[in-house]
């Protein structure tokens, strides 16, 4: 393992930003720290960059004590959400900065720095912009410069703090692919902080899902998608339908609805089940299986349709169906709703005793 | 969009009355007096004007004024940068108190600023007897004049820098550190270039105020002609001697300094606009 993070604790006043985080990253891996704001992902990144000192814990990088090194000796490349380009320098000078501030004996000759800048401009696909100032660039171009500047010093670790946060959706998607290509070309271990689950899933080799200063789940995007281990993970990683149910013996039941619950020992009692729109099925015609609902609206184009429906008790659900399946339903029509891959949550228990239950769940799952 | 925001041409009596009132007022209370200073200074011809500066006391006053400014301005520039750096790049206890204290000299009468130092270093002040024994003279000497000037002009550089530096944030500095730059390199290659025009602007204002300071210096100098008299004090002395042409000639020099300052300030503001573009979203 190139990077080993062990039980990092960091408090801001009385707010626990990191609550004992342990994590490992392989050499050359692209790892995402995914979580809502306040989950501690940015704090962890700043600890790695040396901008924040943890209260407890250890960070090893290739068996070297990382926390003992000052920021400037860590060899990390940090890319900020708002780019933080040097506004009074040209793009070329920005990229050359890390090399040009080296002490005289370690500094490459001028021609070598120039060649390296050209190489990085090409890698980031911003050839010809070397003479411009940051203010003369678009947001997407600025972010490319920021990545090129960070890579110029050949960092051992590339840290990206919400790098696409300030960009519009189209540029964001385009840069996402670019970033992965640059990462693969440079081969540097990369840690990405993001609150966008789609971004994390699309870019990374593995995703560390964070919540309240802890790692809720760590796995490949596919593992997280197939087997979310907690209601939090399930809700954060995609759209959800919710339905109050009675859970016993691993099956959630209410008013004709019955579904086996994910997880080995989900517990018994009054809970809420969560399930994805694409795991939701609607049945037309007579029958007793399924929750009685009424179709409200059918939306969408092409092959996929979303059928919005409502139970008698008022809850609303979305079902993603194929064009053919959705064709059976019209607004106002009665139907029965069933679901696969159902996750149960016991919000009442969680609300009354937040911390211990969260621990217990992490331990049992 | 812009058509709705521009004022439509046409007869607008309110607008003209406002413009005439504003121009009239500025002309009456600012333009006229400054013009009169120059008229009076040259009223007996250029030779009489020049004769004022042939006096050794006048030369001594100019030299002392330049010396005081040469000491006080760099001190306050250094303090201003340090204070603005500390207040905008770090979080610490007592930050809001320091921010308020920096502004205090602006609302404090300069006479009080002078008396404060008399209280500390004067013959009957806290350190007076001690300094007397050591043979060090502060009050009624150059150190006292410098101290008074430093206190009065302390906020001028800091106040120029604080809004700019807090708008710029610390991200560029952090980026420089992660790229391997040391503290002085970060300051010299990232922070200083980002604030250079605002810094020059502040230094210019500080210099104009330092050379023109009367109140604090008046208390601290002892007004010994040819020795501890600065240019503004020299103006007062000549005036009290009924040497009106001399007084106005010296005053014209100070007024000229103000006009040069104004011109440079305007130029710097233009340069500053061009050189520190916003890093907002494109």
Image: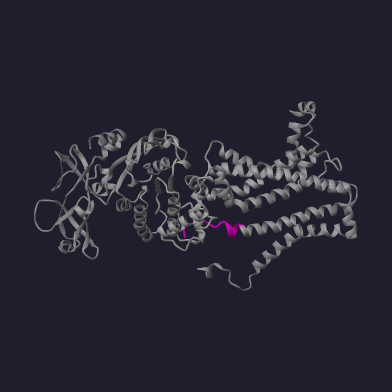
Percent x, y of residue A115: 47, 57
User: Residue B220 vs residue A317: left or right?
Assistant: right
Question: Residue shown at 78%/60% (left/top)?
Answer: B32
Magenta span dominant secondary structure: loop
Residue B61, compared with residue B252, is above or below; it is above
User: Residue A161 vs residue A237: left or right?
Assistant: right
Specify the quadrant of the image occupied by residue B25: bottom right
Residue B65, compared with residue A124, is above or below; it is above
Residue A41 seen from this side? yes
* Numbered range of the magenta stretch: B272-282
A314 or B137, nearer to the observer: B137
B135 or B114, nearer to the observer: B135
Percent x, y of residue A308: 23, 57
Residue B276 drawn in magenta? yes
Residue A349, compared with residue B168, is above or below; it is above
Residue B109 seen from this side? no
Percent x, y of residue A131: 51, 61
B184 or A317, nearer to the observer: B184
Percent x, y of residue A166: 42, 55
Specify the quadrant of the image occupied by residue A278: bottom left
B73 or B245, nearer to the observer: B73
Residue B43 drawn in magenta? no
User: Residue B227 vs residue A75: left or right?
Assistant: right
């Amino acid at each position: 393992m190139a990077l080993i993070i062990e039980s990092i604790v960091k408090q801001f006043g009385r707010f626990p930003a990191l609550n004992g985080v342990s994590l490992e990253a392989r050499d050359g891996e692209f790892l995402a720290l995914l979580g809502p704001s306040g989950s501690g992902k940015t704090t962890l990144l700043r600890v790695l960059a040396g901008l924040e000192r943890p209260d407890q814990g250890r960070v090893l990088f290739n068996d070297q004590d990382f926390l003992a090194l000052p920021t400037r000796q860590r060899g990390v490349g940090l890319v900020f959400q708002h780019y933080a380009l040097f506004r009074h320098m040209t793009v070329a000078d920005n990229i050359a900065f890390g090399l040009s501030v080296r002490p005289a004996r370690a500094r490459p000759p001028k021609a070598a720095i120039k060649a390296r800048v050209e190489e990085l401009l090409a890698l980031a696909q911003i050839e010809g912009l070397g003479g411009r100032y940051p203010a003369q660039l678009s947001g997407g171009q600025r972010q490319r410069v920021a990545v090129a500047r960070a890579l110029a010093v050949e960092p051992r670790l590339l840290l990206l703090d919400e790098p696409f946060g300030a960009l519009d959706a189209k540029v964001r998607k385009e840069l996402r692919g670019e970033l992965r290509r640059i990462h693969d070309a440079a081969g540097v271990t990369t840690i990405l902080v993001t609150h966008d689950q789609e971004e994390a899933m699309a870019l990374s080799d593995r995703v560390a899902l964070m919540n309240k200063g802890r790692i809720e789940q760590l796995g490949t995007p596919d593992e997280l998608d197939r087997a979310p281990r907690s209601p939090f993970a399930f809700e954060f990683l995609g759209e959800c339908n919710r339905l109050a149910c009675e859970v016993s013996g691993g099956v959630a039941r209410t008013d004709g609805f019955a579904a086996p619950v994910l997880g080995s020992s989900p517990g018994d009692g009054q809970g809420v089940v969560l399930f994805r729109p694409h795991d939701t099925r609607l049945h037309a015609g007579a029958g007793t299986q399924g929750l009685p609902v009424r179709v409200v609206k059918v939306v969408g184009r092409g092959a996929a349709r979303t059928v919005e429906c409502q139970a008698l008790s008022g809850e609303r659900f979305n079902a993603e169906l194929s064009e053919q399946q959705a064709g059976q339903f019209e607004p106002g029509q009665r139907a029965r709703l069933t679901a696969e891959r159902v996750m149960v949550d016991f919000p009442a228990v969680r609300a009354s005793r937040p911390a211990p239950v969260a621990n217990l769940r992490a331990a049992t799952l | 969009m812009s058509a709705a925001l521009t004022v439509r041409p046409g007869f607008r009596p309110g607008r003209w009355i406002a413009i005439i009132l504003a121009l009239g007022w500025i002309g009456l209370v600012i333009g006229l007096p400054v013009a009169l200073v120059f008229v009076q200074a040259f009223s007996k011809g250029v030779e009489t004007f020049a004769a004022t500066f042939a006096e050794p006391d006048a030369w001594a006053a100019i030299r002392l004024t330049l010396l005081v400014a040469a000491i006080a301005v760099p001190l306050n520039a250094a303090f201003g940068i340090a204070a603005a750096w500390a207040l905008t790049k770090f979080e610490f206890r007592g930050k809001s108190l320091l921010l308020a204290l920096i502004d205090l000299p602006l609302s404090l009468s300069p006479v009080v600023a002078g008396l404060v130092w008399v209280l500390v270093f004067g013959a009957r002040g806290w350190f007076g007897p001690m300094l007397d024994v050591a043979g060090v003279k502060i009050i009624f000497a150059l150190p006292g004049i410098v101290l008074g000037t430093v206190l009065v002009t302390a906020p001028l550089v800091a106040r120029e820098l604080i809004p700019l530096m807090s708008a710029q944030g610390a991200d560029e500095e952090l980026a420089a550190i992660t790229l391997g730059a040391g503290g002085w390199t970060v300051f010299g290659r990232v922070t200083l270039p980002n604030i250079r025009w605002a810094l020059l602007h502040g230094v210019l204002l500080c210099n104009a105020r330092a050379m023109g300071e009367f109140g604090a210096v008046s208390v601290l100098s002892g007004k010994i002609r040819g020795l501890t008299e600065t240019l503004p004090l020299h103006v007062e002395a000549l005036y009290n001697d009924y040497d009106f042409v001399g007084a106005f000639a010296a005053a014209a020099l100070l007024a000229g300094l103000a006009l040069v300052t104004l011109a440079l300030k305007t130029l710097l503001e233009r340069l500053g606009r061009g050189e520190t573009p916003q890093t907002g979203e494109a």
